[in-house]
Amino acid sequence: MHPQYSTLARLSLDLSIAGRETVGRHFSSRLDGGRVSRTGRQAAAVDNSVIRAMARWPNVPSVYGWMSLDRRGRWCLQGKPVLHRGAIGFMNRNYACTDRGLWYFQNGPQRVFVDLEYTPLVFTLDGSRNLLDHTGRPAGQVLEAWIDEEGNLLLMGERGIGLLCDRDLQSLADDFHYEDDSVCDEEGIASLLEGSAATSVHLNWYGQRIPIATIQRQRVAEEFGFEPRPRADDVDE
């Protein structure tokens, strides 16, 4: 075991230089954890340099409580956003999930578990209104949708559950429709949240009519099978 991998200094160093050894082959890793993905498994790209490090230094202790993902899809180290593009790209490519719904990125031979401010994926819209998750991967087909008591929109993509970034929520305002396909206004959304809506509301997304259900924020992690605060006691290593 390489002893330096158990220190915050090593993690900080790796984040500052990550992405410089990222060319070459990519290998697949499991992404689904519990009920995070309801549509099966989808492979994540794992850097060749990561595979080499895992082979060289097996059984390196995992890291908990240092890295987090905020509700806008930003990686944070001890609460401060990571700004280095190479580091962000490295974490994006090596982000994965255990069978028990604990999300992490593979930092060389070491798993760095990620605290989640809300969901394990955060969706944004690009200039062409394509839905991408915070790692830059396409969300694929949107399967289901929910809105919580705070007005947050949750979407089930092919890779799993994700929060739509609040900056993009207004862009979808005209895509909320009533059963008769008329545009749902703010009053209709409020009625939906209160449970007093006289008619159903759906998201009109590229010709799909995706029913919008309601959900309490405190139930989201349990409902979709992920752990928002992974700690050593949650992991069998």
Image (spheres, rainbow, N blue to C red):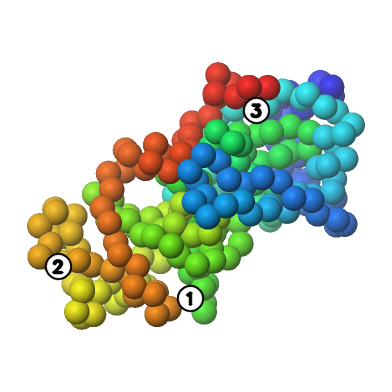
Give how far apart the Cα atoms at labels 3 and 1 are: 36 Å
- Please report contact status of discs 2 and 3: CB closer than 8 Å, yes or no: no
Please provide percent x and percent y for residue 129.
Answer: 48, 76
Residue corresponding to mark 2: 199
Give how far apart the Cα atoms at labels 2 and 1 are: 27 Å
Point 40% across, 80% down: residue: 207
Horizontal relation, residue 236 to residue 38: left or right:
right
Point 69% across, 33% down: residue: 111
Horizontal relation, residue 179 to residue 235: left or right:
left
Give how far apart the Cα atoms at labels 2 and 3 are: 48 Å
Horizontal relation, residue 27 to residue 215: left or right:
right
Q: For mark 1, does the 10 Å Cα neighbourhood hold few (<14), some (14 to 19), or many (20 or more) residues?
A: few
Q: Depth-wise, is mark 2 or mark 1 nearer the camera? A: 2
Identify the mark nearer the N-term, 3 or 1: 3
> Which amino acid lies under the numbered mark 1 shown in the image of this protein?
Arg
The quadrant of the picture occupied by the N terminus is: top right
Residue closer to the observer: 83 or 104: 104
Q: For mark 3, does the 10 Å Cα neighbourhood hold few (<14), some (14 to 19), or many (20 or more) residues?
A: many
Horizontal relation, residue 45 to residue 185: left or right:
right
> Which amino acid lies under the numbered mark 3 shown in the image of this protein?
Val
The quadrant of the picture occupied by the C terminus is: top right
Residue closer to the observer: 78 or 138: 138
Residue corresponding to mark 1: 129
Q: Depth-wise, is mark 2 or mark 3 nearer the camera? A: 2
How many numbered dots are placed on residues in this image?
A: 3
- Please report contact status of discs 3 and 1: CB closer than 8 Å, yes or no: no
Identify the mark nearer the N-term, 2 or 3: 3
Res 7 seen here: yes
Please provide percent x and percent y for residue 222.
Answer: 39, 36
> Which amino acid lies under the numbered mark 2 shown in the image of this protein?
Thr
Residue corresponding to mark 3: 63
